[in-house]
Image: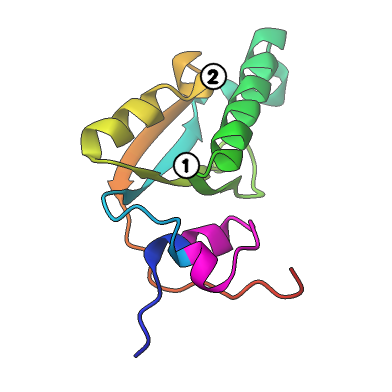
Amino acid sequence: MHRMNRRHLLLTAAGLGLQGPAAAQTGSPKMKTFLYMLRLVPRLHAEAAWTEADRRAVGVHFQHLKAATDAGTVVLAGRTDEALATTFGLVVFEAADAAAAEEFMKADPAVVAGVMTAELHPFSLALLRQQQGR
C-alpha cells in the first residue's frame, strides 16, 4: 500500500488544495493529531436562555478556530445539526504532544467563556476522501 505523508492528508482534508510532492515537503513528523468534543453547558440547552455574551463567545470561538484552520493547526471543525441539548462539536487538530493539545483545547474561547465543555482524545487519521476539482 502506498503510504502518503500524514501532513499531505491533513492539508488535503483542510481543503488547502496542496497536491503531490509540494505537500509532502511541508509536513512535520513531530506533530500528533487530536480531537476534542464540545458540548453546550446545560443552561444553554434552551434558546431563550442565551445571552448576548454567550452569542458573542461562540462568535469568538468560531473566529479562533477559523484562524487556527488558516494557520494549518486545525484540520476540520464542525457540529452536528441537532437540538441544542444533543448537539456536539468536533475539532480535529495537530499539536506537538498531549500537553500542547490540552492547552489548545482549554484556550478555545467557548470553553474559556464557560458556554461549552470540552473533552480531549488522541486521534488517528485513517482515511480521507480526495478533494475533487480543487
Q: Earlier in the sequence, mark 2 or mark 1?
A: 2
Give the distance between the C-alpha atoms of the residues marked 2 and 1, in whole angstroms: 31 Å
Determine the residue positioned at 69% across, 18% down.
Answer: 55
Magenta extent: 10-23
Which percent across, then down, holds residue 17?
65, 62
Determine the residue positioned at 63% across, 24% down.
Answer: 58
The three-letter amino acid code for the residue at tag 2 is Arg
Q: Which residue is mark 2?
A: 43
Residue found at the very far bottom of the displayed protein: 1
Q: Which residue is mark 1?
A: 73
Which percent across, then down, holds residue 91?
48, 44
The answer to whether 86 is drawn above or below residue 109 in the figure is below
Determine the residue positioned at 28% across, 32% down.
Answer: 100
Q: Is residue 127 magenta?
A: no
Q: Is residue 17 magenta?
A: yes
Determine the residue positioned at 72% across, 10% down.
Answer: 52
The three-letter amino acid code for the residue at tag 1 is Thr
Q: Report whether 93 appears left or right of 54.
A: left
Q: Nearer the viewer, residue 72 or 91?
A: 72
Q: Report whether 131 appears left or right of 69.
A: right
Which percent across, then down, holds residue 72?
52, 44
Q: Quadrant of the C terminus?
A: bottom right
Residue 47 in sight here: yes
